[in-house]
Image (cartoon, rainbow, N blue to C red):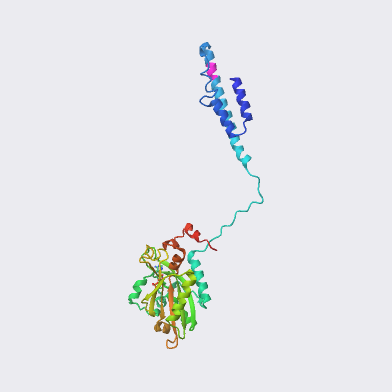
Amino acid sequence: MQEIKERLERDLANAKSAADVEQIRVHYLGRKGCITTLAKGTDFSRFSPEEKKQFGIRLNQLKNFAAEAIQKASQQAGAAAPNKKAPALDLTAPGAGRRLGALHPITLTQMELEDIFQGMGFSVLAGPEVESEYFCFEALNIPHDHPARDMQDTFWLKNNLILRTHTSANQVRTLLRFGAPIRAVFPGRCFRYEAVDPSHENTFYQCEGLVVDENISVANLIAVMKTLLSEVFRRDVKVRLRPGFFPFVEPGFELDLNCLLCGGKGCSTCGDGWIELIPCGLVHPEVLRHGGIDPTRYSGFAFGIGLTRLAMMKYGIRDIRSLNAGDLRFNKQFAVL
Ligand code: FA5
């Protein structure tokens, strides 16, 4: 036993790693280890009862000693290991980089629209999201009991102001402020009490456009729409223009885009292959009058681009709800700065 103990101490002193210590443990205390099997290999018939007792006591002492020494050596080897592997400080390594934010696809689309319209001589204006009923509806020829209001149910505040349902609310504000001639766009957030689905949100963006000048006709409107679409998509896209009713334009149109998600076959985002994208028309004389403009001298056109839907078509986003969800995994895909 003394000899085994000394051999164990020597072996542990020479061990260089945790793996070495583990090998030593198996050799001494494993199932077939030399300490474990010591009692089996001993002929006890030669021993007196007292000798047997002494043998047992000393064997236990040896086992305890071995277990403690091996555990200690194993701890030391474990603690030493990371130090041995730790790399030297590398002063040339790049520092921890700052994480850059990314622009939201709606912001990207809005910035692009502003750029395109500024290139066509439009000013970029903004108006309030909390709006009066007058500018949102009445000034636009939508009296209190007009059925057109049903299509734009909204959120009412306690002070009788509302969250604007469309950026058209800026039309008369702008005319009153700047007069004619005027060429302006007003992008911004709108709100509606909507049944939300893949193409309808309760909070979404539009980009309104208003041009008032002498001799403005539908031809001017169509030219601007064509330029806009070719700049945004930079390829041929299919559109259709059909009559649309809005009390603040006459005539009124709906400009629909052939869905770019399904190629016009029909999908859960568009339904029938067409996305309602840009309602538009010639400004109603009554709206010009509310804006203090003489309709016998001036005429104009207006349009209301569904900016959020445009972003969906441009970036291939199938569900409008992803845009307001605040999920960074989604937002990071558009990491353009
Ligand atoms: C209007 O809001 C009119 N003010 C547009 C207009 C402006 C007509 C100027 C004539 C002259 P409409 O409710 O259709 O119209 O909405 C315009 C566009 O906004 C739609 O074509 C669609 O692209 C987008 N839009 C409307 N409701 C939602 C919604 N809940 N979620 C996402 N986009 C919407």
Main structural element of the magenta stretch: helix, strand or loop? helix
Q: Is residue 321 visible?
A: yes
Q: Position of residue 263 (x, y in %)?
A: 40, 65
Extreme-front residue of the structure: 236
Q: Position of residue 132 (x, y in %)?
A: 42, 75
Magenta stretch contains residue 54: yes
Q: Residue at x 58, y 33 (%)?
A: 19
User: Does residue 334 sit above or below 121 in this rendering?
Assistant: above
Q: Residue at x 62, y 27 (%)?
A: 11
Extreme-bottom residue of the structure: 296
Indicate left or right for 267 with 121 as reference: left
Q: Position of residue 259 (x, y in %)?
A: 40, 66
Q: Residue at x 44, y 66 (%)?
A: 313
Q: Position of residue 137 (x, y in %)?
A: 39, 77
Between residue 241 and residue 74, name the one nearer to us.
241
Image quarter in which the N terminus is found: top right
Indicate left or right for 47 with 300 as reference: right
Q: Residue at x 53, y 11 (%)?
A: 46
What range is drawn magenta here?
Answer: 53-57
Between residue 141 and residue 182, name the one nearer to us.
182
Ligand 1, image quadrant it occupies? bottom left
Q: Quadrant of residue 152?
A: bottom left
Magenta stretch contains residue 228: no
Indicate left or right for 98 with 334 as reference: right
Count every numbered label the image shows and give the total. Answer: 0
